[in-house]
Image (cartoon, helix red, strand yellow):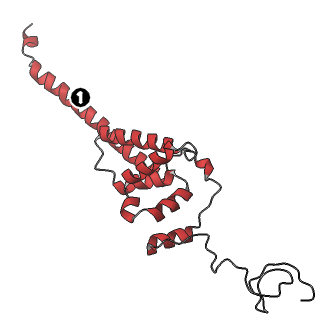
């Protein structure tokens, strides 16, 4: 029984605690890396959802996991905002870029406020309502660069039909400028 009494339990416990701490630290680093990879993937392709409510839920869940993993400083606001923008249809990206300043457009909290507002409207919650609408990306880029609002559907002029080679507008046998397109015989 002599050699068993010489064991220092304090050293064994300290070694065991050290090994457990090292293993847990590895798990924490792995969680942090997983969360950062998920943010990067979301910023690249979006959350892959079809409702504004789902965007809100996915964002909030990923935000909670980021806080629990201690990786809040690893992900920038710009990456989070990009993840939200990639998750919504192009129509709303162009619309919101025209409505917001550059700082608001890159702020994930402002974008999430917009998403929550859209999720609250039952007729606007689904992305299917605007899936057939394709904004003109050239006009959208010009809006962001100049800071001016330009309508994508602007044709120009006063809405009157264009003049023909005789200087008269309208259809048919119109004899005067700006008059209706009726057919006049012999006038």
| Total numbered labels | 1
The crowd level at tag 1 (other Cα within 10 Å; few <14, some 14-19, many 20+) is few
Outermost residue to the top: 1
Q: Is residue 40 visible?
A: no
* Residue at horizontal 35 percent and vertical 39 percent from the top: 64
- Work out which quarter of the rendered image holds the C terminus and state it: bottom right
- For image coordinates 18% across by 27% down, the residue present is 17
Name the quadrant of the N terminus: top left
In terms of image quadrants, where is residue 11? top left
Q: Nearer the viewer, residue 97 or 184?
A: 184
Query: In the figure, is residue 6 to the left or right of 153?
Result: left
Specify the farthest residue to the bottom: 166
The x and y percentages for residue 77 are 35, 54
Residue 87 sits above or below residue 180 on the image: above
Viewer-side residue, 118 vs 82 = 118
**Residue located beneath label 1 in the image:** 20
**Horizontal and vertical percent for residue 23?**
27, 32
Q: Is residue 94 left or right of residue 102?
A: right
């Amino acid at each position: 029984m002599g050699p068993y009494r010489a064991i220092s339990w304090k050293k064994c416990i300290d070694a065991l605690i050290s090994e457990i701490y090292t293993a847990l630290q590895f798990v924490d680093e792995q969680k942090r890396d997983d969360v950062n990879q998920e943010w990067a993937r979301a910023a690249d392709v979006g959350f892959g959802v079809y409702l504004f409510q789902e965007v809100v839920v996915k964002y909030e869940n990923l935000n909670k996991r980021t806080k629990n993993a201690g990786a809040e400083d690893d992900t920038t606001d710009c990456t989070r905002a990009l993840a939200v923008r990639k998750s919504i249809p192009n129509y709303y990206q162009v619309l919101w870029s025209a409505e917001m300043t550059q700082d608001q457009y890159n702020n994930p909290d402002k974008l999430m406020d917009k998403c929550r507002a859209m999720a609250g409207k039952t007729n606007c919650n689904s992305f299917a309502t605007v899936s057939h609408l394709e904004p003109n990306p050239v006009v959208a880029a010009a809006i962001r660069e100049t800071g001016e609002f330009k309508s994508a559907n602007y044709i120009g002029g006063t809405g009157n039909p264009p003049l023909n080679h005789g200087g008269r507008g309208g259809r048919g046998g119109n004899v005067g400028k700006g008059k209706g397109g009726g057919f006049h015989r012999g006038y």
